[in-house]
Image (cartoon, grey):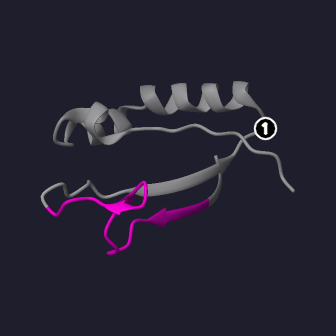
Amino acid sequence: MDSIGFWVTNDEPVELKGSRVPDDMTPPSNITWAIRWEDNAQRDRVHAEVDADPEWIELFSKVLGGRASYHIMQVKFADEL
């Protein structure tokens, strides 16, 4: 994977549509990352390999709620300017 960068949520309160989230609604930690793919086929192939990798399976088995509670993905493709 050609990682472009990683960003982690800072200590600023979360904002949702211009208003702050109530203190009792603490969101989970968030890491945003960008990866450069040749095309959708490469992305799909690599993700399938990671999903089947025993080390990743073991890692996600230790996460409270399993992979479904940890790994939420928003996929967006963009063109370089």
Q: Is residue 77 magenta?
A: no
Q: Residue at x 71, y 28 (%)?
A: 40
Q: Secondary structure at mark 1?
A: loop
Please name the residue shown 37% across and 56% down the image: 30
Question: Which quadrant of the figure contains the C terminus?
Answer: bottom right
Q: Residue furthest bottom?
A: 11
Judged left or right of residue 81, residue 21 is left
Expressed as whole percent of the image width and height from the top left, the position of residue 17 reads 43, 54
Magenta segment: 5-23
Looking at the picture, how far across and down is residue 56, in whole percent? 37, 38
Name which residue type carries label 1.
Answer: Glu
Residue 21 sits in which quadrant?
bottom left
- Above or below, 73 against 48 in this view is below
Q: Is residue 52 above or below residue 73?
A: above
Q: Is residue 38 left or right of residue 19?
A: right
Instruction: Please give the count of numbered marks on the rendered protein.
Output: 1
Write down the residue under mark 1. Answer: 38
Where in the figure is residue 74, as x and y percent of width and height? 51, 39
Residue 47 pos. (x, y %): 54, 31
State whether residue 2 is above or below residue 7: above
Q: Quadrant of residue 63?
A: top left
Residue at 43 percent of width and 65 percent of height: 8
Q: Looking at this view, is 74 or 2 the one in front? A: 74
Task: Name the outermost residue toward the left.
Answer: 24
**Left-right relation of 35 to 20:** right
